[in-house]
């Protein structure tokens, strides 16, 4: 009876995961989808705890609920207090914790196998060779360990890069060769451990489980080597890829325990993360193979871009207010600088003010704007910007020719025309927002500093472009105030 009810709980959890993921595909229902998925997870967890077959002591229940309470409090408070600019770092760390959990599960289950099943047959196997390892179990254990460990160590490095602790990519000599060798050794050891049962015999025919810790160390090292050379401009790609790794590791945990809801959740996260990675790669004009083998991110840091010569012009807030007030169509391009300045609320106020004057306002969203997939969507949703006004790159590009003013706030590389015109540029071939086709281009930046690609932006020297210098929040607040005086 308990088993049947538990299976129903898992079915409910699986269905709510799918429903929640579907709802999160739309900003209007994303929050509700998150709650639906959380409800399903709660049902699955409680069902596992109370409907588990076998006796469980009160102390174990106390430890379980104590750990749940502690994790809930820490997670809730951390997510509640985090600034929007720090959201990518939080996502990376939470993702890393998921990978670490999958790796720990594999270690624990292997130790159960090592201390219970294997010692009973090891001596007989050493003499007769009659022992046949449980290959399915071992594949799930070792694959979960490797993938979870790579996700954990890679996510930690991504976190350090995003918070500025490791603000520059590091390229080791013959990096690609070293990385590939470590990867081959890691999966070679994994295959050998599955074949051999994961145990080696000492000289006195005693079993030793040291190989699994060697596999753990290799996986952690590869996760570091995989992530450490990647530049900041490529963070959206690596975050989505590491997210898919965590989902895949969780799916192997589902195989390990024959747990349907764990398997479903892992597959959903893994497949969604993989699909998002492919989309991010397309947006960055990079192949998935180059991401997997670490052959991206380094060149952008080293390249200096074209030798740009030309003059720039700036615009005063009063002139900009007049220009926007008498425009028919304005497109706003948000970037990471908008998040840093926490100017999402004032830019929404600017949008509402312009619409009151009869100006059509839209937001142009590049797939890799910000530091994680969907960063700008989340940022603008926080200030109640209507989702209908957020237009993706492929849809907004044809509209720029009919746009009176493009206001670029904190974006850089995603609007650089060098991606289309300069074959020597490290971002050449990357799809961009074609803002240079608009009638007037306004760029709000603190200074003339380069973006994460480390190259100058040709757009700044366009005769139609004017620089609106200053902190985004302060500058936009002044613009809103100036517009209000024109009523």
Image: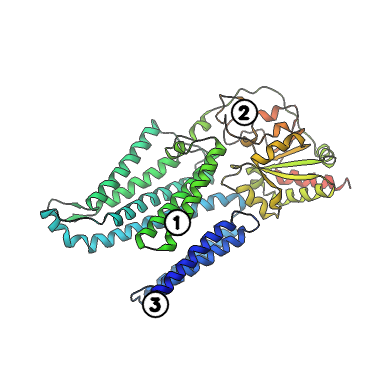
**Residue 474, label in figure:** none
Q: How far apart are marks 3 and 2 (CA)?
A: 65 Å
Q: In this view, does 406 lie above or below 358?
A: above
Q: Is residue 398 above or below residue 206?
A: above
Q: How crowded is mark 2: few (under 14 residues within 10 Å), some or many (20 or more)?
A: some
Residue 210: x and y in percent read: 25, 52
Residue 423: x and y in percent read: 57, 24
Mark 2 — residue?
420
Mark 3 — residue?
1
Please name the residue shown 72% across and 47% down the image. Answer: 473
> Mark 1 vs mark 3: which is more N-terminal?
3
Please name the residue shown 77% across and 32% down the image. Answer: 439
Give the quarter of the image for residue 395. top right
- Secondary structure of residue under mark 2: helix
Mark 1 — residue?
266
Q: Distance between the residues labelled 2 and 1?
A: 39 Å
Left/right placement of residue 236 relative to residue 345 reads left
Asked if one can make out residue 205 in the rendered structure from this viewpoint, the answer is no
Q: Residues within 10 Å of mark 3 (few under 14, many from 20)?
A: few
> Mark 3 vs mark 2: which is more N-terminal?
3
- Secondary structure of residue under mark 3: loop
Left/right placement of residue 329 relative to residue 140 reads right
Residue, far right: 487
Left/right placement of residue 57 relative to residue 332 reads left
Q: Residues within 10 Å of mark 1 (few under 14, many from 20)?
A: many
């Amino acid at each position: 009876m308990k088993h049947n009810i538990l299976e129903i709980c898992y079915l409910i959890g699986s269905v709510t995961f799918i429903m929640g993921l579907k709802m999160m595909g739309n900003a209007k229902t994303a929050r509700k989808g998150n709650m639906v998925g959380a409800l399903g997870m709660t049902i699955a967890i409680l069902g596992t705890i109370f409907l588990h077959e076998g006796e469980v002591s009160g102390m174990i229940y106390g430890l379980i609920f104590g750990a749940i309470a502690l994790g809930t409090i820490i997670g809730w408070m951390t997510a509640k207090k985090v600034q929007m600019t720090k959201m990518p770092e939080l996502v990376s760390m939470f993702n890393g914790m998921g990978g670490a959990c999958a790796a720990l599960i594999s270690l624990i289950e292997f130790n159960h196998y090592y201390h219970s099943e294997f010692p009973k047959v090891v001596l007989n196997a050493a003499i007769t060779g009659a022992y046949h390892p449980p290959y399915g179990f071992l594949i799930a254990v070792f694959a979960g360990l490797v993938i979870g460990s790579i996700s954990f160590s890679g996510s930690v490095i991504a976190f350090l890069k995003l918070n500025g602790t490791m603000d520059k990519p590091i390229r080791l000599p013959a990096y690609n060769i070293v990385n590939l060798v470590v990867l081959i050794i890691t999966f070679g050891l994994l295959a050998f451990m599955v074949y051999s049962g994961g145990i080696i015999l000492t000289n006195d025919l005693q079993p030793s489980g040291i190989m699994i810790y060697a596999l753990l160390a290799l996986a952690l090292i590869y996760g570091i080597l995989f992530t450490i050379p990647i530049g900041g401009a490529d963070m959206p790609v690596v975050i989505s890829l590491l997210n898919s790794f965590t989902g895949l590791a969780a799916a192997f945990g589902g195989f390990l325990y024959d747990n349907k809801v764990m398997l479903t959740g892992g597959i959903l996260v893994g497949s969604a993360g993989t699909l998002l990675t492919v989309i991010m790669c397309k947006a960055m004009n990079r192949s998935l193979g180059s991401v997997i083998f670490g052959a991206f991110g380094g060149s952008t840091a080293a390249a200096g871009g074209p030798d740009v010569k030309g003059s720039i012009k700036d615009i005063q807030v009063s002139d900009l207010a007049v220009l926007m007030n008498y425009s028919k169509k304005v497109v706003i391009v948000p970037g990471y600088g908008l998040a840093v300045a926490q100017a999402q609320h004032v830019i929404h106020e600017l949008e509402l003010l312009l619409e009151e004057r009869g100006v059509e306002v839209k937001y142009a969203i590049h797939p890799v704007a910000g530091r994680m997939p969907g960063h700008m969507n989340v940022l603008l949703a926080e200030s109640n910007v209507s989702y209908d006004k957020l237009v993706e790159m492929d849809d907004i590009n044809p509209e720029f020719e009919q746009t009176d003013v493009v206001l670029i706030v904190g974006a850089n590389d995603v609007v650089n025309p060098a991606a289309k015109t300069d074959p020597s540029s490290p971002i050449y071939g990357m799809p961009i927002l074609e803002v240079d086709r608009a009638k007037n281009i306004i760029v709000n930046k603190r200074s003339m500093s380069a973006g994460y690609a480390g190259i100058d932006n040709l757009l700044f020297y366009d005769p139609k472009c004017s620089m609106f210098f200053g902190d985004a929040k302060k500058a936009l607040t002044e613009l809103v105030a100036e517009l209000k005086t024109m009523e």
